Image (cartoon, rainbow, N blue to C red):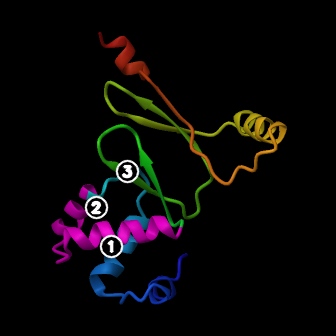
Amino acid sequence: MVNLEALLKDRGIKLTMQRRELFEKALLQHRHFSAEDLYASLRQKRAGISRATVYRTLKLLAANQVLDVHDFDRGYRLYESRLERHHHDHLICLRCGKITEFENPEIEMEQERVAKSRHFKILSHTHKIYGLCQRCRTAH
């Protein structure tokens, strides 16, 4: 688990009760979430946290590679925890917005092969495939 105190102290940010609750809520998500989703969830619990604090803290977590940030062409970012998660890629339905995670070692090996053949060092990547899920394809 991330040492919240050390992470924030290194950045000169005080760990308030609200920030601790935000960290825990964000890091324990088992789905993709937006800043507004997180803010609404915290407001429901009467956490007394500002929207600006939510956005700043999510930016901090992403910059420290605790959260992944995704742009799935929705007009806003989605986040997901990197803690105790394997690398995975995404299938995104253009009709209903459903996001399906998948892992495929052959795709990963092919990416490495292509990069190596071009003397390129991969530092990170994201693979997104857009289309229609089965439910949307059959639901004319």
Tell me which label, 2 or 1, sits earlier in the chain: 1
| Distance Cα–Cα, label 2 vs label 1 | 8 Å
Query: Of discs 3 and 2, which sits in the foreground?
Result: 3
Which residue is painted at 76% across and 46% down in the image?
120
From the image, give the main secondary structure of the stretch colored magenta: helix
Which residue is painted at 75% across and 50% down in the image?
121
Tell me which label, 3 or 2, sits earlier in the chain: 2
Q: Which residues are magenta?
A: 36-64
Relative to 88, say whether 84 is above or below: below
**Residue type, label 3:** Leu
Pick out the residue farthest to the front.
Answer: 119
Q: Is label 2 in contact with label 1 (beta carbons under 8 Å)?
A: yes
Which residue is painted at 34% across and 33% down in the image?
97
In terms of depth relative to the viewer, which is nearer, 20 or 6?
6
Query: Of discs 3 and 1, which sits in the foreground?
Result: 3
In terms of depth relative to the viewer, which is nearer, 11 or 41?
11
Label 1, secondary structure: give it: helix
Which residue is painted at 44% across and 48% down in the image?
70
Question: Viewed as shown, does residue 135 lie left or right of 50?
Answer: right
- Residue 54 forms part of the magenta stretch: yes
Q: Name the residue beneath numbered marker 2.
A: 38
**Residue type, label 2:** Leu
Q: Name the residue beneath numbered marker 3.
A: 78
Q: Residues within 10 Å of mark 3 (few under 14, many from 20)?
A: some
Relative to 7, say whether 125 is above or below: above
Label 2, secondary structure: give it: helix
* Image quarter hosting the N terminus: bottom right
Residue 99: x %, y % from top left: 42, 37
Q: Name the residue beneath numbered marker 1.
A: 22
